[in-house]
Image (cartoon, rainbow, N blue to C red):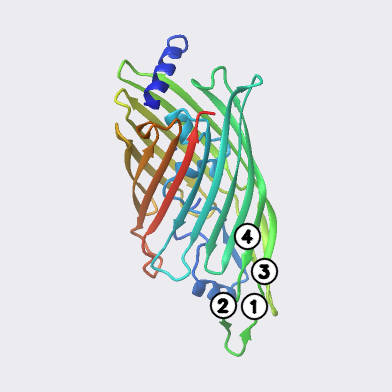
């Protein structure tokens, strides 16, 4: 299969050269919460990046320098994919997130190793939405991209913040507070650094080790939301992400991928996600993980490629997350579906 071909090529070269925010602290709130906050407060603080169960599928959105899993695991340098996530399904107006992505990793193109692509994202929570379009570019500092390197990446785009007030009825002690719908555009910039290294550990195993840090929201800003009587502000703060992980390959065409995500936001506890995925010798994989915020997730998926006589790969994955912590009401679990198509172009 393609994994064995990748290992043969990497082992031959190694003779010469030697994986934010915290649930409960996010801005994801229900219709009722929005109404209460607009009544009693004039400033909201939050971040506009959604949560994910399978972070690796959207790692380029969080760290613009990060490699796609299709490159490290399957040696495919062109990937397009989509994700759908529903969170807090026990609440009305619960968050829904859709992302569409594409990445191309150019091995030594015209003497330069580059990576480029883009993202479309739609994050909807009750009447509040964020819709963004991003371009992504990264440069790889390496003598041989299949053996490792250091990547510097940048994302830039526009995000539309919107409030649909059709279903919001806000009352104070005397009168109804009239709300007007809002739609505002603002720029978004992210930066990141990422490093990876291939290592041979003997005849039966080899590995990629990778890690990186990123700030996907470099531009902090205050968004002003107006109604007929007052002005309200949504403040966006900078977040810092760290990632560390590895792929441990075996000669039966299987691998294990442990990873750790660390997320920091001002005035919120540091959150750590620990995950592990096992790609079986056939087409299936399974995984699990947990975080210091009190969440647990399970995932499974299938890889379709050479087993169907294809020269490319189709990956379909499903993740289920459950939170053992609550801020009051029961929030329910979360579901996430990912699909990607990749090839060596």
Kindly indicate whether the residue at mark 2 contacts the one at mark 3 (C-beta within 8 angstroms).
no
* Residue pictured at 55% horizontal, 72% vertical: 37
Kindly indicate whether the residue at mark 1 contacts the one at mark 3 (C-beta within 8 angstroms).
no
Give the vertical position of 273 relative to 152 (above or below): below
Secondary structure type for disc 4:
strand
* Residue pictured at 48% horizontal, 39% vertical: 341
Q: Earlier in the sequence, mark 1 or mark 4?
A: 1
* Residue pictured at 54% horizontal, 44% vertical: 62
Front residue of 7/154: it is: 7
Give the crowd class for mark 3: few <14, some 14-19, many >=20 residues within 10 Å.
some
Give the vertical position of 175 relative to 153 (above or below): below
Give x and y (percent) for residue 108: 60, 21
Q: What whole-number distance in Å separates the C-alpha atoms at marks 2 and 1? A: 8 Å
* Residue pictured at 54% horizontal, 29% vertical: 345
Q: What whole-number distance in Å separates the C-alpha atoms at marks 3 and 1? A: 9 Å
Give the crowd class for mark 1: few <14, some 14-19, many >=20 residues within 10 Å.
many
Residue designated by label 4: 235
Residue designated by label 3: 182
Outermost residue to the top = 16
Q: What whole-number distance in Å separates the C-alpha atoms at marks 3 and 2? A: 13 Å
Front residue of 108/218: it is: 108
Q: Is residue 92 left or right of residue 286?
A: right
Give x and y (percent) for residue 2: 40, 26
Secondary structure type for disc 1:
loop
Q: Earlier in the sequence, mark 3 or mark 4?
A: 3
Kindly indicate whether the residue at mark 1 contacts the one at mark 2 (C-beta within 8 angstroms).
yes
Q: Earlier in the sequence, mark 2 or mark 4?
A: 2
**Quarter where residue 60 is shown:** top right
Residue designated by label 2: 168
Secondary structure type for disc 2:
loop
Q: Nearer the viewer, mark 2 or mark 4?
A: 2
Give the vertical position of 41 relative to 103 (above or below): below
């Amino acid at each position: 299969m393609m994994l064995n071909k990748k290992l043969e090529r990497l082992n031959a070269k190694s003779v010469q050269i030697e994986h934010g925010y915290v649930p409960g602290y996010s801005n994801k709130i229900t219709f009722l919460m929005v109404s209460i906050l607009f009544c009693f407060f004039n400033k909201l603080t939050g971040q506009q990046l959604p949560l994910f169960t399978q972070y690796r599928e959207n790692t380029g959105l969080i760290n613009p320098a990060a490699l796609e899993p299709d490159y490290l695991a399957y040696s495919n340098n062109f990937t397009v994919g989509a994700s759908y996530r529903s969170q807090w399904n026990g609440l009305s107006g619960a968050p829904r997130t859709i992302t569409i992505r594409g990445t191309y990793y150019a091995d030594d193109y015209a003497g330069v190793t580059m990576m480029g692509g883009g993202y479309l994202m739609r994050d909807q929570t009750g009447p509040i939405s964020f819709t963004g379009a991003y371009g992504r570019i990264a440069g790889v500092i390496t003598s041989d991209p299949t053996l490792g390197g250091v990547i510097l990446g940048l994302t830039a785009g526009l995000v539309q913040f919107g409030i649909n007030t059709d279903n919001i009825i806000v009352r104070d002690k005397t009168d109804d507070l009239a709300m007007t719908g809002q739609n505002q555009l603002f720029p978004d910039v992210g930066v990141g650094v990422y490093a990876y290294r291939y290592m041979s550990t003997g005849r039966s195993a080899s590995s990629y080790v990778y890690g990186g840090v990123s700030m996907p929201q470099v531009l902090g800003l205050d968004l002003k939301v107006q109604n007929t009587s007052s002005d309200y502000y949504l403040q966006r703060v900078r977040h810092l992400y760290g990632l560390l992980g590895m792929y441990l390959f075996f000669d039966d065409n299987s691998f294990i991928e442990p990873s750790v995500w660390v997320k920091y936001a001002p005035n919120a506890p540091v959150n750590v996600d620990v995950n592990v995925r096992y790609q079986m010798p056939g087409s299936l994989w399974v995984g699990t993980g947990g975080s210091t915020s009190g969440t647990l997730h399970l995932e499974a998926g299938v890889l379709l490629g050479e087993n169907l006589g294809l020269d490319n790969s189709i990956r379909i994955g499903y993740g289920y997350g459950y939170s053992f912590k609550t801020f009051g009401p029961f929030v329910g679990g979360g579901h996430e579906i990912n699909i990607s198509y990749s090839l060596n172009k």
